[in-house]
Image (cartoon, rainbow, N blue to C red):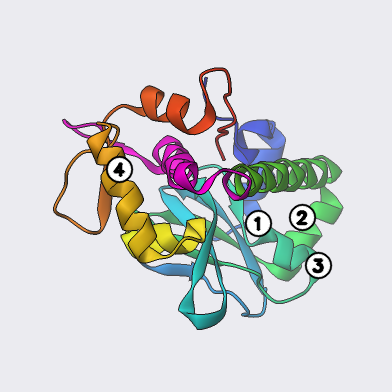
């Protein structure tokens, strides 16, 4: 089933209003570029035109927590503009990504002028917060042996790139350890366990994991009768 985005929810006139107010830079963000930075003043929001980016929270000791993945048609940075506070997360491009920028004054003016867009922004925010909470609870509540499998299911569904071996996810063992709360060494052991079960390919590269059998990994991580995983 096709993922429904904020842009999908807009009617023709609302899309024209969004295009009229926003500004599209000539150059895209490349993979690894920071689009929005945690703790910065929220002076603008953006609509992702194409591409994909990862939303991360930076905590103590340089540890990060994975929050979500955003793709074309979705908003980023709008919550900081709405509440007027500093940014609560960092957004990093996963691939070449084009955005349409909205200065905070222009964005708030657009919402005041178009209540239909305002309603859909709030609906989008609420839906994404629920999905993010669901994802974090699904991992935090899982036994340690299943946490990494649940995270890999999530990442494969929202970020995975099909390859000859399976679905490739760009992620390091340090990130897997941080995002599951188990640490790098324990995450490495869990990856090797999943390799022995043939859910994950043997790969020498430390910056990517290839899921070879996503349905089987999902059953292992969530149980045969449980479809707890959700798309962002």
Which residue is label 4 attached to?
Answer: 193
Q: Position of residue 187 (x, y in %)?
A: 37, 56
Q: Earlier in the sequence, mark 4 or mark 3?
A: 3
Residue 176: image quadrant is bottom left
Of badges 4 and 2, nearer the viewer stands 4
Real-space CA distance between mark 1 and mark 3, rounded to the nearest whole angstrom: 20 Å
Query: Marks 4 and 1, how far apart in space?
Result: 51 Å
Snapshot quadrant of residue 59: bottom right
Label 4 or label 1, whichever comes before in sequence order: 1
Check residue 21 in the rendering and tell me which mark sits there, or answer none. Answer: 1
Task: Tell me the CA gap for discs 4 and 3.
Answer: 44 Å
- Which numbered disc, 1 or 2, marks the residue that appears first in the sequence? 1
Q: Position of residue 51 (x, y in %)?
A: 40, 48
Q: Earlier in the sequence, mark 4 or mark 2?
A: 2
Circles 1 and 3, Cβ within 8 Å, touching? The answer is no
Task: Give the number of the mark in front: 3 or 2.
Answer: 3
Q: Which mark is residue 78?
A: none
Residue 120 seen from this side: yes
Say if residue 27 shows up in the picture: no
Q: Nearer the viewer, residue 112 or 154?
A: 154
* Span of residues in magenta: 139-166
Q: Which residue is mark 3?
A: 83
Looking at the rendered structure, which numbered label has been put on residue 110? 2
Q: Mark 4–mark 2 contact, CB under 8 Å?
A: no
């Amino acid at each position: 089933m096709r993922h429904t985005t904020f842009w999908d929810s807009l009617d023709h006139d609302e899309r024209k209003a969004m295009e009229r107010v926003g500004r599209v830079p000539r150059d895209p963000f490349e993979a690894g570029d920071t689009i929005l930075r945690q703790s910065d003043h929220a002076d603008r929001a953006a609509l992702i035109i194409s591409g994909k980016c990862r939303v991360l929270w930076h905590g103590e000791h340089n540890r990060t927590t994975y929050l979500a993945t955003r793709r074309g048609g979705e908003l980023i940075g709008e919550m900081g503009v709405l509440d007027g506070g500093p940014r609560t997360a960092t957004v990093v491009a996963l691939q070449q990504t084009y955005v349409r920028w909205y200065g905070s004054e222009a964005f708030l003016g657009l919402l005041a002028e178009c209540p239909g867009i305002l309603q859909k922004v709030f609906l989008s925010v609420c839906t994404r917060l629920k999905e993010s909470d669901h994802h974090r609870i699904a991992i935090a509540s899982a036994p340690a042996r299943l946490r990494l499998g649940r995270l890999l299911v999530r990442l494969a569904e929202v970020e995975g790139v099909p390859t000859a071996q399976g679905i490739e996810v760009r992620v390091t063992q340090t990130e897997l350890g941080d995002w599951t709360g188990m640490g790098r060494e324990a995450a490495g052991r869990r990856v090797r366990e999943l390799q022995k079960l043939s859910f994950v390919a043997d790969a020498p590269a430390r910056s990517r994991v290839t899921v070879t059998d996503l349905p089987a990994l999902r059953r292992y991580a969530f149980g045969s009768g449980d479809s707890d995983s959700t798309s962002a």
